[in-house]
Amino acid sequence: MTLGSEWIIPQQWQDYSAAEHAVWDMLFARQRTQLPGRVVPSFLDGIEMLDMAKPGIPDFADLSSRLNARTGWSIVAVPGLVPEEVFFENLAQRRFVAGRFIRRADQLDYLQEPDVFHDVFGHVPLLADPVYADYMQAYGEGGLRSLKYGAIHKLARLYWYTVEFGLIRSADGLRIYGAGIVSSHGESGFALDDPGPNRISFDLKRILRTTYRIDDYQQTYFVIDSFDQLLRQTLDTDFAPLYAELEALPDIGMTDILPEDDVMMRGTQR
């Protein structure tokens, strides 16, 4: 039996109500209008390749068939948040775990627990990008190793500041790629346009030391040059001595700026 297989449940796509499909369609239409010119182009390419623009909550079996042919990934339904080891094991096996429930119509702008819109709209399109798909697998493998060192609280920050709330440089300025931003109408604007948050060039050690919050827009975003940079940093770093070094260093507050930080300008244009 595969580790964590007891957490995998049928999506039961046929059981979604018309009202639930309508919530997905409202959320999708709003983000589809807002994101062009703000999101990394490969995200929109993934939407098209996976045929996610058709009405209604996507069928995980259909998504998995298309995605597997492209990058070897599949989508599996789970009842909610899963244990860390289960989450990492599935990523390492190129399976993305997604909640099957969807928020109510009166919860369009905020939901504490990730639902199918966050998990599928936010995360799945970039899994069609081969380099990003490899990064997600590498993160899962790294997560399993981190459990041996008691360092999951450090590595979780890398996921938070890349997969969930990452920004990327482009020839036209900063772009969004983190799922927590692309699935949020409010933060899709805030992350690029608001003068308040810090936007700092990617630095692995800096990220692993930086705290974050889950109940409001982020006060610091980290900016990568490319998905290849993200993958290479993950594959080429020996995390064991890095974790040991970090144990002797204090955390960095989520709003702090260090003298050595490379702070980026805001906005969608240079």
Image (spheres, rainbow, N blue to C red):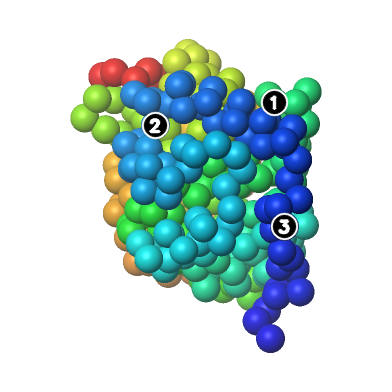
Marks 2/1: CA distance? 20 Å
Tell me what residue is drawn at x 42 percent, y 59 percent: 66
Q: In the depicted view, which residue is nearer to us: 33 or 208?
A: 33
Residue 267 in the image: state x and y as whole percent: 37, 18
Q: How crowded is mark 3: few (under 14 residues within 10 Å), some or many (20 or more)?
A: few
Res. 212 mark: none
Q: Quadrant of residue 80?
A: bottom right
**What amino acid is labelled 2 in the image?**
Val
Marks 3/1: CA distance? 22 Å
Tell me what residue is drawn at x 60 percent, y 72 percent: 89
Tell me what residue is drawn at x 54 percent, y 23 percent: 30
In the picture provided, is 265 more to the left or to the right than 193?
A: left
Q: Assess whether mark 2 and mark 3 are in contact (beta carbons under 8 angstroms).
A: no
Circle 2 sits on which residue?
39
**What amino acid is labelled 1 in the image?**
Leu
Circle 1 sits on which residue?
108
Reply above or below: 109 against 144: above
Q: In the depicted view, which residue is nearer to us: 206 or 269?
A: 269
Residue 21 in the image: state x and y as whole percent: 67, 37
Q: Residues within 10 Å of mark 1 (few under 14, many from 20)?
A: some
**First in residue order: circle 3 vs circle 1:** 3
In the picture provided, is 259 more to the left or to the right than 98?
A: left
Residue 3 in the image: state x and y as whole percent: 68, 79
Circle 3 sits on which residue?
12
Marks 3/2: CA distance? 31 Å
Tell me what residue is drawn at x 37 percent, y 38 percent: 44
Q: Is residue 126 visible?
A: no
